[in-house]
Image (cartoon, helix red, strand yellow):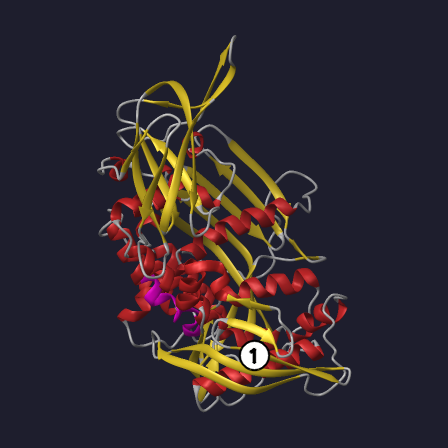
Amino acid sequence: MTYSSNPGPVAPQPGPPGPSRNPGLLKAIAIVAAIVLAATGGFAVNRLLVTQVNGASSATNSVKDFLGALEDEDWTRLGLLLPPDETDQLAGLIGDIGDLQSKLGSAGQSPIDQFEGISVEISDLRLTSEAVEADLTKVSIERATIILKIDARTIESLADLVPDVDPAAVGAVEIEVSINGPEVTYKTTTADDVDTGTETAVVGDREQAPFLMSVRRDGGWFVSPTFTAAQYTAEELGWQTADPGPPEAGYDSPEQALTGFVEGLVETLQTADVTHVADAMGGVESRLLKTYAPGINAELDADSDFDFDFGIESPVTIDDLDVEVTRGDNDQARVRIDKFEATLRSEGTGATVVFDGDCIRTVGESDQGCISDGGPSAERLYGAFGHVVAVPADGGWKISPVATYFDWVAIAQRAISRVDADLLKAVVGLDFSGLAARDPAATIGSGDEVTVDVEAVSPEIYAGVSVVDPQPSPELIDYSCSAETQPGLCEIIVVDGSGRRQDRDSRYDIDTGYQFGYEIADDTRLIVLAVAGPVVIESERY
């Protein structure tokens, strides 16, 4: 990376006359940002390899060091320049992803491996900084030349990030971006096309240079993906910011943290002031919500649908709360509500609401809603995900929605990793070869009906797979299925002997008209994906 020796103004870069205010530029920037942020989880893992997390000496240096580490592909240094409170939740999840990749046959690959085909060159860099709040600084890239090269293999692996792009037609990509304040000149070169132009970056109603946000944590400065996204949103919507101030003390136990969170949420609903629930949160979300509270509160206050003014000081009283607390990952606690009783008051009247672990009802009324109404799958889902996560914070415990989300994702990831490898490859990679090679559980002829028993693949996932052998037929045959416990949760995939998916076909006969269905050969197999339990399969000739 090279830096300008003259930090003063420079002449605009040459480009087409009359640069436009095109929102397409921001979309392009968003795509590049998605590529960078998609690797953030991999960078965060490297934080586990070191114990010194001091950050940079200034906000400007944090961005300069971050871009330098990106250019050098120094993932450890890059990980150390991300805020600890934004990366702590990712470490365990990345390990689970590694286990899943191994089961899918990608052993030895880390989340960073797919980015080996990306190189970044940065020169002529000039940064300026502007304090937004006491520990939050906006660092603008006033001038830079950035060359991003992505090889064809990586373009293919990143195809999902860029919709409506054919990786085979694109090939390798080289993007050269010259930034001069809000004016951005770009040149994109692909296998069969070169696109150039100049755009003006506009956020909200203001032309300005692209920027990153840096936050101070324990005396050091870190580049914050979370606050960068939030600041772009805030400026686009015209939000003001506020100093979040010192945090409220944590609660004495995870149980008290849940009670405090519910009370804060109720107060936020009543007052349209997000700081009440933010004070009860741990993690980065508390600081984030309180920083942008003026803008968020203005949006809530202006929303006619957000009208929860009950007209009294305490609209909800928690009379009884029975929770189960179990240990989670990273010294966290999972808090599940087993039972509760609460009184709701409005306009001088009150109602008592009771939850018994399965059903919720209002005392004195017959109607109730129960988890068990959704069948065994709903009960298992609640058993796996019916909790929130409390984290050690501010000298005690607080509920963290972010930690809760990542805990749910990790549980789902581990449940998927325990699934049979053949089924996992079919669901994740649409590779049905392993399932097609299995011994069939039943045989079905033309016009027949058979019942197979589908077993749950894991304690958390109340669903599974069965393989059925259809008898060959010269006519087109169609199939349908229905699960006994939940009829709509069933699907049949028709494959050949190698596992290649077969398309539904049609024929026209002058005597019988149109026929619809599948051509059934000796090696055809029906892959039945359904909720666990008995599943009825029917075949029909059209």
398 or 480: nearer the eye? 480
Image vertical order of residue 185 relative to residue 499, above or below:
below
The location of residue 460, given as percent across then percent down, is: 36, 61
72 or 442: nearer the eye? 442
The location of residue 392, given as percent across then percent down, is: 41, 83
519 or 373: nearer the eye? 373
Q: Tag 1: Cα neighbours inside 10 Å, few (<14), some, or many (≥20)?
A: some
Q: Is residue 366 visible?
A: yes
Q: Is residue 85 magenta?
A: yes
Q: Is residue 418 magenta?
A: no
Residue 490 left/right relative to 303: left
Task: Label the magenta part by its dominant secondary structure.
Answer: helix
* Residue at 61 percent of width and 55 percent of height: 181
Residue 331 occupies quadrant:
bottom left
Image vertical order of residue 339 relative to residue 533, above or below:
below
* Residue at 41 percent of width and 80 percent of height: 324
Numbered-mark total: 1
- The three-letter amino acid code for the residue at tag 1 is Val
Q: Is residue 218 visible?
A: no
The location of residue 512, given as percent across then percent down, is: 51, 13
The location of residue 360, given as percent across then percent down, is: 55, 73
Q: Which residue is mark 1?
A: 354
379 or 431: nearer the eye? 379
Residue range in magenta is 83-94
Q: Quadrant of the N terminus?
A: bottom left
Q: Secondary structure at mark 1?
A: strand
* Residue at 26 percent of width and 23 percent of height: 522
Image vertical order of residue 518 relative to residue 174, above or below:
above
Residue 246 occupies quadrant:
bottom right
Residue 418 left/right relative to 505: left
